[in-house]
Image (cartoon, rainbow, N blue to C red):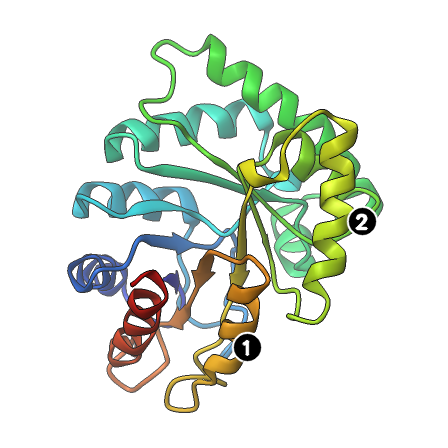
């Protein structure tokens, strides 16, 4: 599940994280933005790292992380230290999701240079070795495996970084486009002497066009193409009462049927 920290209280996000864990979700992700991405643009919103630390205390089993941290407005060495610390709070359950960033308002209002897609991805490429090196130098190091999740689908910059650094590749690529992207990723992996099977394929599903409107045909097609991590987005304003947790069970049932 991805619980967007918008249009609700912090306690509601914590309660939702606990509840989806109880229901059987495998992972709970937040996001790394400073303002809502939907609904009232001036609505209630919370910062990612502090929220994830709260979830780490409130949960016991699920993996946790941001989908994804924006490298472009976070110092790489500090981000490595922050995430290592949250990993210890969670007992080694943290997933390090990272990308180049895209939401211009986040940059402008907080005083960061927005740049271009190319400059943001070049910055990410330079940051990833620093992050990994800092984890090795920190005392203590991360408590768990701290898998690296990289978001994006660009063939010239993002997929080479995935092949070099990622344990998980996340995108919103459609089923008919995924085989081509995987061929490109496989080529980048081969060039680096890496087996693409080492990388878990992740994709986003939509509840707004899915359950209660949920179409599982897209998920079936993504699964057939090799996707194994599916993130289900929920927002604090899904219903008048907050997160639409009643939508979750249908996805868990679909997952369990695929794993049977």
* Viewport quadrant of the N terminus: bottom left
Q: On the image, numbered disc 1 is attached to which residue? A: 218
Please give left or right for residue 150 compared with residue 117 in the image. Answer: left
Toward which corner of the image does residue 214 lie, by quadrant?
bottom left
Mark 1 element type? helix
**Vertical arrangement, residue 137 with respect to residue 71, above or below:** above
Q: On the image, numbered disc 2 is attached to which residue? A: 155
Tell me the residue at 30%/53% (across/down): 26
User: Would you call the spot at circle 2 few (<14 residues within 10 Å), some (14-19), or many (20 or more)?
Assistant: few
Tell me the residue at 50%/30% (across/down): 79
**Vertical arrangement, residue 146 with respect to residue 119, above or below:** above
Tell me the residue at 40%/42% (across/down): 49
Tell me the residue at 79%/35% (across/down): 122
Between discs 2 and 1, the one toward the N terminus: 2
Gap between marks 2 and 1 measured at Cα: 23 Å
* Viewport quadrant of the C terminus: bottom left
Please give left or right for residue 167 compared with residue 119 in the image. Answer: left
């Amino acid at each position: 599940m991805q619980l967007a920290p918008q249009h609700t209280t912090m306690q509601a996000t914590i309660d939702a994280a606990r509840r989806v864990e109880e229901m059987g979700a495998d992972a709970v992700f937040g996001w790394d933005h400073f303002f809502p991405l939907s609904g009232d643009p001036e609505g209630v919103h919370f910062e990612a790292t502090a929220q994830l630390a709260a979830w780490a205390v409130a949960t016991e089993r699920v993996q946790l992380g941001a989908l994804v941290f924006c490298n472009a407005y976070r110092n790489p060495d500090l981000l490595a230290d922050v995430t290592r610390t949250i990993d210890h709070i969670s007992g080694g359950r943290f997933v390090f999701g990272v990308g180049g960033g895209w939401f211009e308002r986040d940059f402008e209002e907080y005083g960061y240079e927005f740049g271009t897609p190319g400059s943001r991805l070049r910055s990410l490429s330079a940051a990833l070795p620093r992050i990994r090196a800092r984890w090795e130098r920190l005392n203590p190091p991360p408590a768990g495996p701290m898998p690296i999740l990289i978001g994006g689908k660009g063939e010239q910059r993002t997929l080479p970084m995935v092949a070099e650094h990622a344990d998980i590749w996340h995108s919103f690529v459609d089923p008919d486009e995924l085989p081509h992207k995987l061929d490109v990723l496989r080529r980048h992996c081969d060039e680096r002497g890496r087996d693409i099977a080492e990388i878990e394929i992740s994709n986003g599903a939509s509840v707004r066009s899915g359950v209660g409107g949920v179409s599982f045909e897209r998920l079936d097609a993504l699964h057939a193409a090799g996707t194994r991590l599916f993130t289900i987005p929920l927002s604090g304003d899904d219903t008048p009462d907050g997160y639409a947790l009643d939508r979750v069970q249908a996805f868990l049932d679909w997952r369990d049927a695929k794993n049977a």
